[in-house]
Amino acid sequence: MKLEGATVLITGGTGSFGKTMLRSLLGDGAEQVRVFSRDEEKQDALRVSLRDDRVRYYIGDIRDRSSIANAMKGVDCVFHAAALKQVPSCEFFPMEAVRTNVLGSENVIRSAVEAKVKSLVCLSTDKAVFPVNAMGLSKAMMEKLAQCVARELGDQSETTISCVRYGNVMYSRGSAIPLFVKQLKTGKPITLTEPTMTRFLMPLRDSVELVRYAFEHANQGDLFIKKAPAATILNLVEALKQLFDVPDHPIELIGWRHAEKLYETLASAQELATSEDMGDYYRIRLDIRDLNYKPFFSEGDDKLVVQEDYHSHNTERLNVSEIKKLLLSLPEVQAELAGWSASR
């Protein structure tokens, strides 16, 4: 299936990923792209900035099955990005995370099957692996729901369901880098939790490429991961201080935020044992065991090779110079630097 000439639905279409994916789809010649979200103001801003008749705007909430089912009619492909993503807010309101990330995702998945959508790609996060917070737990359940329905459908279904899992998207809304830049530009101390903490670094363009790769290569129930470099939070801050030429800018250590990890994991050793290395990506295949309990309790698999988890402590580690180069490739950082230089 090609995206050229297709009708595509993006849930959470006014978010950082959604807007980038939307522009990419329009560039590919999609016949129609439907933006589904509950934020009327952001939809209006997007409509004014794009002025493209191929884009249709749907106000709704994935928690409401009827609203997402209505937007799904006649759609060829769905990219499911709508979610509650902030760790602290999900910790304070865990049932809200369940209602959106779990029950809302089930509405999207079931509606896609009913509408005979050809491909559904669900966006997940590294926090779904060994989850310690409500956001990660809810995203892990979303993955399980997608895999459950994929297992029910089988390979002969009209609808292929897949997932992607990635780490921090650089300069996405609510992420650390925009906060650090704001603190730097306003003269406030940069607030760090734990300097040795590592995080994967992925530009928004790479997250779009990952989703596209899943769309093009997925078999029923596949989960795709893009290999990505990581950096310590301290080196990330040092790179920003050097780019903005403020080497003496103060740093304030505030301690660990609630439910944070020292490092994030993109794939467990068990998942990697049955995965396919596809170069820049890992394909983690669907576990197709059914309700026959024997394979779970009394039969093993002597072909599995135990190996390390794939996490931000053991992936490629970027130094300060490499982080600066990656940051300079981001349009948002380029714009911030241009404005900073003009104001000094």
Image (cartoon, rainbow, N blue to C red):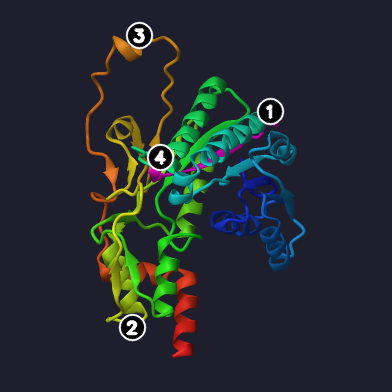
Q: Are marks 1 and 4 in contact (CB under 8 Å)?
A: no
Residue that badge 2 annotates:
245
For the record, the magenta segment spans 115-128
Residues under labels 3 and 1: Cα distance?
32 Å
Question: Where does label 1 land, which residue?
Answer: 114
| Label 1, label 4: how far apart the Cα atoms are | 27 Å
Three-letter amino acid code of the residue under disc 2: Asp
Q: Which element carries disc 4, helix, strand or loop? A: helix
Residue under label 4, please give it.
128
Using the image, determine if residue 288 lies above or below residue 247.
Answer: above
What numbered label is drawn on residue 294? 3
Quadrant of the snapshot with the C terminus = bottom left
Between the C-alphas of marks 2 and 4, the distance is 37 Å
Type of the residue with mark 3: Lys
Q: Where is residue 36 shown, x and y percent of the image?
A: 67, 48
* Badge 2 element: loop
Q: Residue at x 43, y 27 (%)?
A: 286
Q: Earlier in the sequence, mark 3 or mark 1?
A: 1
Give, as a three-letter code, the residue at label 4: Ala
Q: Specify whether residue 122 is painted magenta.
A: yes
Give the Cα distance between marks 1 and 2: 55 Å
